Image (tube, rainbow, N blue to C red):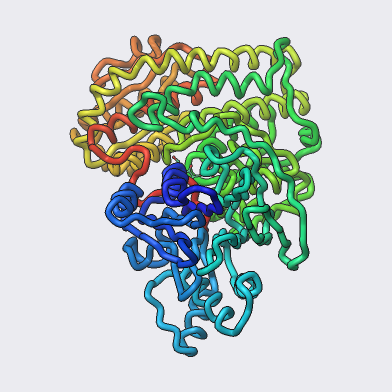
Amino acid sequence: MCGIIGVLGSHQAAPIMVDALRRLEYRGYDSAGIATIHEGALDRRRAVGKLVNLSDLLVENPLAGRSGIGHTRWATHGAPNVANAHPHQSGSVAVVHNGIIENFRDLRKELGKNGVNFESDTDTETIAQLIARELKAGKAPVDAARDSIAQLEGAFALAILFDGEEDLLIAARRGSPLAVGHGDGEMYVGSDAIALAPLTDQITYLDEGDWCVLTRAGVEIFDVHNQPVTRITKQIKLDSARIEKAGHKHFMAKEIAEQPTVLANALAHYLNDDASIQLPDGLPDFSAVDRLIMVACGTAYYACQTAKYWFEQLAGLPVEIDVASEFRYREPPIGSSNVALFVSQSGETADTLAALRYCSGKASDILSVVNVPESSIARESSVALPIYAGVEVGVASTKAFTCQLAVLAILALRAAQQRGCLTDAEVAKHVDALRTVPGLVNLALGIEPSVERLANELAKARDILFLGRGAMFPLALEGALKLKEISYIHAEGYASGELKHGPIALVDEDVPVIVFAPTDPLFDKTVSNMQEVMARSGKVLLVTDATGAERAREGTWDTLVMPECDPVFAPIIYAIPAQMLAYYTALAKGTDVDQPRNLAKSVTVE
Ligand code: AGP
């Protein structure tokens, strides 16, 4: 939700931190700020809006110092303005924070009674004020920080800097991820390895409840009981070049274009040359599983909804799916023969992590499908299946979605094999079909010129509907989400058979209706729903293959012709038009494609 950086360096910290914050801006961009210690004195610069505003401020009013902390914010408490921008400072202490302090109002009240005047509306300032109070009581900085952290409830990743302490940084992690970077005579802390990529690949991830004391000599880590602990330091290979746009106008465009490559890479990790499936040890035997529970948010949820068709139709396995923010509040009964599966690109989505924790100790297995193998969700799973999509920076998830689908499809085939629903030969046939997907996705990218032309029309719409049947229904939902989250046009996805039960009242000549309809067994039914729309002057954009176009393009506004494909895996290939329609419509609208308003890439608060 927010991005944090901390540096104990041998060079000026400000430019290093601004560069790191640029890598973290996908996590939030309502405001940004840094603080440094220079000649013993703590000072800070903060700016509202995008990071470029902070950079401009630093040009006018530079900040010297080799030790510092920085932050890019997605507002939770308090409007996006300078007063609420991090770092928050109280006297000789400055703090940057990602997460939500759930008891901050009680703490504010208590501090207010002791005469503390707050300058912001944020929960974070409370942390700075707490530490300042402990310092005033005569405690050393480390003790003051430790005793203040112990009073906090909720989720936080913190970095704390003290006036006069040029070789000291305190960091803490509870709920929100935090990485410690080891340099040569330098030490860093950051929200993730991406932020630290140009500085070091030697990363130590703090565990839940850890806090630590950094100096340039190294780090001392303490667990939630303040006991010294050692955490593994790993070499995290993150080619910092991979986090650039590689000549594309936006990260989203790059990540759409990368899909043939990353899909082939993901499949290569799980499929052998003889078309057999290669999955990590520790997975359950699905013949003994009576229910699969899949939980996620947003696009990842639509991946689950798509996979439900595969698990049920190919493996005969009952599947329950839910959005993570609702799941645990339903208090669903979880049986010991149930397997719980969590899908998350970031692996840090608070709602999904909370749902995982609800299932821990109840379900027989906790599985996850993630893009960040060292993420919290991965670490708390019995088996985590990486999707190998590479770093995804665009807030609108694209390549992660299709790679999630590919891995879920492979898992469904494994389940089908173990449950005796598919013979080895039938599995091999599906694997062969899956292997053609990267090439078909590459072909599908060829619709780009048609999409660009159509998008100029779509950009004028007030409302847009997406329709699909069967496994294309979740794709209709995903297409609507993609479009609304980056173009800000209201869009809804519907099961095409559902339109006539009310939503068709929305249809008139100004409402484009985008219909995903490969020539699968449900094609004719979808076409009749499409004709119901056209009979009411609805503008239908049909997305189908050449066969479908021949049979049903008559009377449509336009038709996007996709490569012929195995209908089972069509949702992976048809994700391309869904993504491209959103991208080019947003471009036509002039919105910020990679950093759409009000959003963040990883929602690490509930
Ligand atoms: C998708 O384009 C959105 N950015 C959002 O819905 C996202 O899929 C959701 O927040 C889940 O994120 P996760 O996959 O990292 O858990």
Q: How many marks?
A: 0
Q: Is residue 97 above or below residue 262?
A: below
Q: Is residue 211 above or below residue 558?
A: below
- The reply, left or right, for residue 370 in relation to residue 3 is right
Residue that appears at 32% across and 47% down: 52
- The reply, left or right, for residue 95 in relation to residue 53 is right
Residue 526 image offset from top left, x and y in percent: 40, 25
Residue 423 quadrant: top right
Q: Is residue 20 above or below residue 287?
A: below
- The reply, left or right, for residue 455 in relation to residue 375 is left
The residue lying toward the viewer, choosing from 328 and 585, is: 585
Residue that appears at 58% across and 80% down: 134
Can residue 353 be seen from the camera position used here?
yes
Residue 311 image offset from top left, x and y in percent: 64, 31
Residue that appears at 61% across and 44% down: 183
Residue that appears at 74% across and 22% down: 278
Residue 560 quadrant: top left
Residue 63 image offset from top left, x and y in percent: 38, 57
Can residue 320 be seen from the camera position used here?
no
Residue 303 quadrant: top right
Residue 491 image offset from top left, x and y in percent: 32, 41
The residue lying toward the viewer, choosing from 228 and 537, is: 228
